[in-house]
Amino acid sequence: MIRSQGKSFKWQGEYSGDLNCARTLNTELGVLSSFKPVIAEKQRDIKYLFLANVDPDIQNHLLSHMRRPRLIGLDSMNFWIKHKRPALLRLLKKVDIFVANDQEARDLSGETNLIKAAKKLSRLGPRMVLIKKGEHGVLFCSKDFTVSLPAYPTDKVIDPTGAGDTFAGAFMGYLAKAGRLDVAAIKKALAYGTVAASFNIEDFGAGKTSCFTLADLDKRLNKLREMVKF
């Protein structure tokens, strides 16, 4: 654990009616502005790497210390798209999957149609693009196939903050466990991400995700499977 003197990273935003779209009010980088991750020797051989939302220069610094990861996922946010766009574009050329919400995908690509946005983002480097659409589900695009899944329907929406991170964690976690990147594995990873995110929104913070089990996920996964079969 690394401790630094100074303020913690702080993001302030609000939801106004539409819980799919958060409006950023303020972002304070704090100690994050000078943070450099320290990678242990044994961590350099991790095969499934997810570069979670942070300064793209920090993400690139971490990536430069890794040895031949099999799959690299990348997340970002509107702050970095606006303020560190050149660094983010350079990093996109080095990753396999770019994960973004619909607003971020439109901001970075300049396209309003999400299919066009995904194709344009793919031309920037990543061979796969995953666009999170909140209550409207997820869109996954690669040059070989496209997958669209609905969100798991729930009327218990307490706080959607962190749902995207929960989705990405479950998605990457399943792929790492499966050890495959075929169509079937990616579809199931998307489904696990979807049901994991449905737990996150039902409480503040990690109130639900800190205590759910694989059995809980599988139960909702089976319900989602029955809903989309036709």
Image (cartoon, helix red, strand yellow):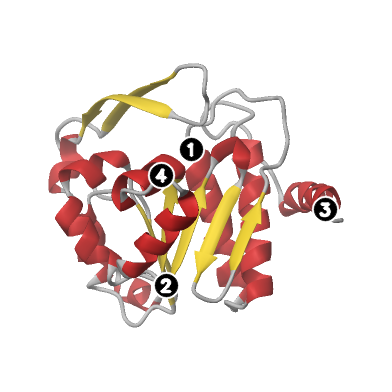
Image point 12% across, 47% down: which residue? 34
Q: Position of residue 209 (x, y in %)?
A: 61, 40
Q: Where is residue 25 in the image (x, y as percent from the top left)?
A: 28, 22
**Mark closest to the chain's N terminus, 3 or 2:** 2
User: CA separation, marks 1 and 3?
Assistant: 23 Å
The residue identified by callout 2 is 127
The residue identified by callout 4 is 112
Q: Which of pointers 3 and 2 indicates the residue nearer the eye?
A: 2
The residue identified by callout 3 is 222
**Mark closest to the chain's N terminus, 3 or 4:** 4
Q: Where is residue 62 in the image (x, y as percent from the top left)?
A: 25, 65
**Mark closest to the chain's N terminus, 1 or 4:** 4
- Provide the secondary structure element on which disc 1 rests: loop
- Provide the secondary structure element on which disc 4 rests: loop
Image point 41% across, 74% down: which residue? 46
Residue 94 or residue 30, whichever sits in front: 94
User: CA separation, marks 2 and 4?
Assistant: 20 Å
Q: Position of residue 210 (x, y in %)?
A: 59, 40
